[in-house]
Amino acid sequence: MKPPKIAWPEGVVSGAPVHPATAAFVANPFREILDEMGAFVYATDLNGSYVYANPMVLQLLGRSLPEVLGKTFDDFIKLEHDEDRAAIDRRVLVHGEVVAREESNVIPHTGEVRTYWSVKRPLRDAGGAIAGMVGVSYDITDKKRLETAVAEQKALLAAVLDNVDALVYMKGEDRRFRYANQRAADAFGLPADQVVGKLDSQLMPQEAAQRFWRKDQEILASGQRSVSEEAMQGRDGRMRHYWSVVVPWQQADGSRAVIGLSTDITELHDLKEELQRQARTDGLTGLVNRRHFQICAQAEFERSRRYGRALSLIAIDVDHFKNINDRHGHPVGDRVLKTLALCMQEGLRGNDVFARTGGEEFCILLPETELPAAAELAERLRAHLELCVALDDLAIKVTACFGVTASAGQDTGFDQIFARADRALYAAKRQGRNRVVVS
């Protein structure tokens, strides 16, 4: 019986007869193209028997063309799970579908698994009936391995970035976020995929967005990385502090971006602030301590000299404080000192510096205050103290001595002012206590 003539798909082969008339196929002018196109090209009849196989197919099967013609794929390679391939072939040979899909085969002589991208389409005879199938497969094993390796690396990087204890992000020169890890997204209260593409001004307060953008522009312009402490109000309204490293980055398309890694140091910042507060604050009364008072006082003295402004000082000593401790105990003495501190603060301005400079000794530094006004304030505080610090449950009445002075033209340092106030304080003691002496 004479074999039917096949209508080959356009662009592949035209007018090629089905096996056994292979000689005619070999003579076809497109044969050389099929042999050299860098893909596995083959054709089968309705039974799946090869009527053509180019050199790459022959090399894969480890057979010559005469050994392959008339045989099926299963005659050479038997896969454990071959139902899918057989079902696909039936879709092409029975239903005339064109199928493009990924396939995997085991190389017989090596046992290696190779992956292919295969396109299978029906061959039709002159009457349009399906007479066979033509297949073209490209070996994408290396590409798949590279894709798998890249996907694994990407998954690993994502796992690291989402679990690192820092906000990691990329922002383009258009101010839009191109990446945000989970911690960065959490800071904005959005899923990570909803952060990408948004402007910084859409995710944070305008003032903060402008401040960060100015810094980003400086980094992009200089090409230098920046390391600094930054602050931004969190979604809960609390100010969060970050230690940020931001570097410039040029992407493959030529566009520029910045990559930032910001570690939340809010707890460390608050601890530092608390330690600094403790370093300048008296632990019992909450007032400025002696050391910090001396620093503030010297700075105010220099400022008063520079601008020709007045500066006054009030020194205070609680009367008979040792007797209070001896009779009622130190807890009561502490109660007296804390009550005195609260009482005195009621009559002071915001820029006055009130300090505990010793056990029962206090000082009030009065910037831009002339001596008469300082003396008047001291007298008001003395009178108020008698009423304010009276521990009725213990029958204790608290009074104090006040020494008042002001800076003078001959003073070269704050120590001289402090010495005059101290002398006035002791003069008040000698004169009977519970009084104000001006020097």
Image (cartoon, rainbow, N blue to C red):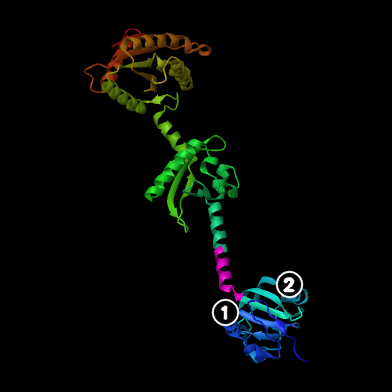
Label 2, label 1: how many angstroms apart (C-alpha)? 24 Å
Residue 12, compared with residue 375, is above or below; it is: below
Q: Which residues are magenta?
A: 138-150
In depth, the one of 117 and 398 nearer the eye is 117
CB under 8 Å between callouts 2 and 1?
no
- Mark 1 falls on what kind of element? loop
Q: Percent x, y for residue 267?
A: 49, 40
Amino acid found under the numbered disc labelled 2: Glu
- Mark 2 falls on what kind of element? loop
Amino acid found under the numbered disc labelled 1: Met
Q: Where is mark 1, residue-wise? A: 37
In magenta segment, residue 145: yes
Q: Percent x, y for residue 138?
A: 60, 75
Left-right relation of 392 to 125: left
In magenta segment, residue 439: no
Residue 270, compared with residue 35, is above or below; it is: above
Q: Quadrant of the N terminus?
A: bottom right
Outermost residue toward the front in this view: 126
In depth, the one of 156 and 68 nearer the eye is 68
Q: Residue at x 48, y 36 (%)?
A: 207
The answer to whether one can see residue 238 in this image is: yes
Residue 12, compared with residue 203, is above or below; it is: below
In depth, the one of 434 and 82 nearer the eye is 82
Q: Where is mark 2, residue-wise? A: 97
